[in-house]
Image (spheres, grey):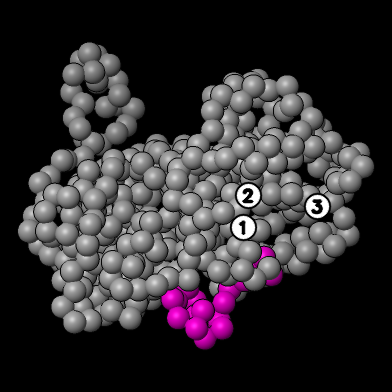
């Protein structure tokens, strides 16, 4: 069924009796041309673009839990393309352009809201860094607006502009940035991929990867063995564990990233705002809750729950930037397992095994990359060569020293 105002009105008159499941629940076939491991945003987007752009529909997405149960539903929903390095700007700008047309393309309301992303600066060093970033963005044709202190004050008068340690002196705004409803992204891509014939297999955990010499022949799962011609790993925080099943050791660590939401408040925050004095960012949801987050927990973990030290730090930064938040009640928190690469940039690449492909290392920025990640990974798998936008994200860049270190901090990718 195609969603539209007419279908909504029709079902309202029919007592909502005509709605059908948005995707099938197929039994796994013994063999597929391509198997994608990971039923999150990136895996589902990859399957969709394999079918849509390359006409490959003999595809299975296998997910150990339910579709969208991982990091795609455990983030702060921010989308942007305000990067500086040549390896990053074209990729994330492509992703933002795909976000802008996504709802029409897949016929699903993903609640894309281009409300703007504002990065604050608090001293002269940060000012120079923002000027460099903004200039690089404009040179790449990406929107960037420089704001002086009074411009920011008119936009967000509730911030603490006179903070003794971190006074707000200005900001860099990307007007086209914003937020997207995270679980709707998973559901929309799943529905669109299913409509093109892709099998979406839930409750199907990979327990082993089969090899014949240097070629992958299939996977062992809790629902039986599945053979494949090509295998794509798209499993976020579990990437290193799955790659090890194929005999690969990745330059990736897994950490937990926490996020939080407050009770519903009257609308007052029109943009996404990031704190330049620490790692803190917040926006207001359509329900009125303030959605916010900070840095990753400082230890390796595959858990999807956070700890009190980072909770305390994030709350301290929230109150420092926006004092009224100290009176809001936090309703809940959640944690996602983040696959942190050593330069803070992703890996979308072929591997030393000729029919094994890798999509990993997204650090804390994987959600905003979902459309471009799926588009580029599908191209890489289908044509056995990278697309121009993901060519810099090859796996062997760590061996060759061609890293893409956006933050300039080496092996501290949480500073991205």
Residue under numbered circle 2 = 295
**Residue drawn 22% across and 66% down?**
209
- Labels 2 & 3 near each other (Cβ < 8 A): no
Report which residue position mark 1 lands on.
414
1 and 2 marks in contact (CB < 8 Å)? yes
Residue linked to disc 3: 121
Give the residue drawn at x 50%, y 83%.
399
Residue at horizontal 52 percent and vertical 55 percent from the top: 300
Q: For the C terminus, give its image quadrant.
A: bottom right
Q: Is residue 52 left or right of residue 121?
A: left
- Tell me where residue 31 appears, x and y as whole percent: 10, 62
**Residue 79 visible at all:** yes
Which stretch is magenta? 388-408
Q: CA distance from mark 1 to mark 3?
A: 18 Å
Pick whichever of labels 2 and 3 is earlier in the sequence. Answer: 3
Q: CA distance from mark 1 to mark 2?
A: 6 Å
- The residue most toward the left is 30
Q: Earlier in the sequence, mark 1 or mark 3?
A: 3
Dominant secondary-structure state across the stretch colored magenta? loop
- Residue at 18% across, 54% down: 221
Q: Nearer the viewer, mark 2 or mark 3?
A: 2
Residue 404: x, y in percent?
A: 58, 73
Q: Give residue 42's quadrant in the image.
A: bottom left
């Amino acid at each position: 069924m195609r969603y539209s105002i007419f279908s909504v009105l029709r079902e309202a008159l029919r007592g909502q009796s005509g709605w059908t499941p948005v995707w099938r629940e197929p039994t796994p076939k013994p063999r597929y041309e391509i198997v994608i491991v990971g039923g999150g945003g990136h895996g589902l987007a990859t399957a969709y673009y394999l079918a849509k752009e390359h006409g490959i529909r003999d595809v299975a997405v296998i997910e150990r839990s339910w579709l969208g149960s991982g990091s795609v539903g455990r983030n702060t929903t921010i989308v942007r393309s305000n990067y500086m390095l040549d390896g990053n700007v074209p990729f994330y700008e492509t992703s933002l352009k795909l976000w802008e047309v996504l709802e029409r393309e897949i016929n699903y309301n993903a609640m894309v809201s281009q409300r703007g992303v504002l990065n604050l600066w608090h001293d002269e060093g940060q000012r120079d860094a923002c000027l460099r970033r903004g200039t690089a963005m404009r040179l790449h044709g990406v929107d960037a607006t420089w704001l002086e202190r009074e411009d920011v004050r008119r936009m967000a008068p509730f911030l603490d502009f006179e903070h003794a340690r971190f006074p707000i002196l200005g900001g860099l705004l990307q007007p086209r940035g914003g937020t997207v409803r995270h679980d709707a992204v998973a559901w929309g891509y799943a529905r669109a991929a299913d409509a093109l014939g892709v099998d979406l297999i839930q409750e199907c955990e990979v327990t082993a990867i089969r090899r014949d010499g240097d070629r992958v022949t299939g996977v062992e799962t809790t629902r039986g063995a599945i053979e494949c011609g090509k295998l794509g790993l798209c499993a976020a925080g579990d990437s290193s564990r799955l790659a090890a099943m194929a005999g690969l050791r990745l330059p990736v660590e897994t950490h937990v990233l926490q996020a939080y939401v407050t009770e519903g408040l009257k609308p007052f925050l029109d943009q996404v705002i990031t704190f330049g004095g620490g790692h803190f960012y917040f926006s207001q949801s359509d329900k009125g809750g303030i959605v916010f987050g900070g840095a990753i927990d400082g230890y390796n973990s595959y858990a999807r729950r956070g700890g009190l030290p980072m909770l305390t730090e994030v709350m301290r930064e929230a109150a420092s930037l926006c004092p009224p938040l100290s009176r809001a009640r936090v309703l809940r928190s959640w944690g996602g397992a983040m696959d942190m690469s050593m330069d803070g940039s992703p890996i979308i690449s072929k591997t030393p095994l000729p029919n094994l492909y890798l999509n990993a290392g997204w650090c804390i920025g994987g959600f905003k990359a979902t459309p471009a990640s799926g588009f580029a990974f599908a191209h890489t798998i289908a044509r056995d060569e990278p697309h121009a936008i993901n060519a810099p994200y090859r796996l062997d860049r760590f061996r060759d020293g061609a890293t893409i270190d956006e933050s300039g901090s080496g092996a501290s990718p949480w500073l991205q």
